[in-house]
Image (spheres, rainbow, N blue to C red):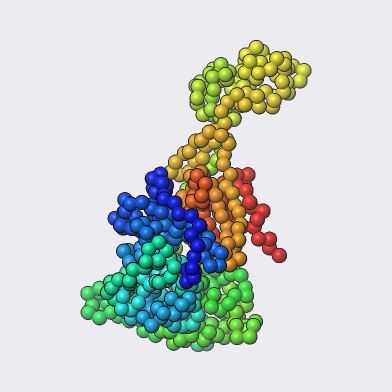
Amino acid sequence: MFSKAVKIKSNNQVKASERKNFKTKVRAYYPDITEDDLNLILPNKPINNLKIQTHNGADVFVYAVEKRVVFFECENILFPSIYTLWKICELIPTFTTHPPVLPKLMQGADLMIPGVVLPENVEGPAAWGKFDKGTIVSINLTNNKAAVAIGRTCHSSMDMYMAAGRGRCVEVIHVFGDELCSLLAPAIPLPELGPPKPKCLEPEIQQVMEDVQSVILDVDETNNTIDIEYHDPVGVTSDDPEIRQLSVEDVDALLIYSFLKCLKTEGKKLSLPMLTSTFYGTHIMSACPEGSALDIKKSSYKKVSKFLSSMSEKGYIKVEELKKGVESVTDIAIDHFDVRSFVLDENDKPKPKVADDPTASVENMLRVTKPVLPLLSPCGIRNAQIITKADVRRAVTDYVKVNALQNVFDPRVVLLNPMLQDICGTSAEALEWSRLLEKIENRMTPVFEMKNAFQTIQCKGKPPIIILSVCTRAGNKKVTLIDNLGLFGIDLVLFAKHCQHGVAASTTINKPPGSKGEQVLVQGNQVAFVGKLLTEKYRIPKKYIRGLELAVKRK
């Protein structure tokens, strides 16, 4: 992206008041960063904010300290520079490649999957880690852990594992030696930080290998039914000198257990036809018991296509080639005896979910003022007290009844005494109920109250509106922008996480210039999902959400 000359359009020093906001923004993008690391890359020295334009016309905001770029913002995503990663190597996930690949990256190439060096002590999907498409990552070399490039993943970790060693891995955005490295000062040489350390097995994967359950598979050849039993391990402890590996039979049993669990729990919900790769990677893999890991290569089937073909022959599913060379699952036999009789293992039963975030409620209220106090004080209401419109209606009704002010011939009309005339600011002798209440409420200060499980927020004025908008960014890519969430007491980081998992799209949180609050960005037109999330999970009425009509219309 910065391989060709860039044009500096503005260069301003960040104000002291904006410095704190920028640090908060960095923490929002990189929540694992420590305070010491943050002070290391953003010391108590001037920060410059530059706006530059790349050769293809894209605008990029750059943040520099002592003439060295530390962060840059592109397509509303905050990326660290390689200079920053030289100081904090573990800030973002890293892919390792061979040194001869670096010149290709410097010439504008992306990192391909065959060029990735995977850890030797991990096999299967675990070797790729766990990340979504669009995750910000860095690239280093086998002989030097200093970052040489930064970009975004082209696929999720599972898709990369299923790609069989083909395709793109990382879309490179910033690389060592490009124009960003020498934007304000000559580039500095690549530091020698030593080779990257081999990645250790993650705790849950290690546990699977050390303390795995024995699985007994009993296949009844006469009716093609499958019975699966789990038994506690015998003679396997964490003190064993050797790690016990899953046998082929164990992997087969775990694979079939996950397959049947998928059909039992999700069979009626799946939208068919579905690509076999999606069916296996998204649904069967996710049905694997917690603490276990599926690796099709370690089973007797070796390939997903062979396994699903076998399940198709047994009548569980129907697999067809709808397009040349592309197989899809077109039908699921949810009434199959094995599916109906399948029972989850005792250790695999779902745990009750605990609410991880609050729902929000919004209510229009009123603050009592001195002009209306004589009317409301008999009901025990004090000056400046915040009350609901229902409280006002009850107080006015009681006053009218006690003073016999309701018109005998027309109950919809209230006769005004001098006090009511003074409050309403009118010389009229009578008003309808609705008009009377409206005038009394207008003499009070409007307040809106927002509640969630953690806090109650009261603010003057009318409730804010959550604004949804769809914009087109560089490369004709659509993004959904959500503004004013913070005004409703919604945790933006948690909200972005819900969006990321719900639509499998990358999300970012940023503060647009001139805006008081932060904004959530979701890749693609996700208005339909966001609207449903706000109304169903957060309980926000639709009247406080603008832009729902921008959702993609289903054909």
Front residue of 375 and 228: 375
Taking the spot 69% from the left edge, 27% from the top edge, the residue there is: 434
Question: Can you say whether 148 is above or below 225 in the image?
Answer: above
Question: Can you say whether 86 is above or below 371 in the image?
Answer: below
Question: Can you say whether 548 is above or below 259 in the image?
Answer: above
Question: Can you say whether 491 is above or below 499 in the image?
Answer: above
Q: Tell me residue 68's x, y (percent).
A: 37, 61
Q: In the image, is 362 to the left or to the right of 147?
A: right
Front residue of 346 and 49: 49
Q: Is residue 344 visible?
A: no
Q: How many marks?
A: 0
Q: Tell me residue 119's x, y (percent).
A: 34, 78
Image quarter hosting the C terminus? bottom right
Taking the spot 60% from the left edge, 58% from the top edge, the residue there is: 471
Query: Residue 88, located in which quarter of the rendered image?
Result: bottom left
Front residue of 332 and 420: 420
Taking the spot 53% from the left edge, 57% from the top edge, the residue there is: 521
Q: Tell me residue 468's x, y (percent).
A: 59, 52
Q: Tell me residue 283's x, y (percent).
A: 51, 72
Taking the spot 50% from the left edge, 57% from the top edge, the residue there is: 9
Query: Residue 250, located in which quarter of the rendered image?
Result: bottom left
Q: Is residue 548 visible?
A: yes
Q: Residue furthest right?
A: 409
Q: Residue furthest top?
A: 418
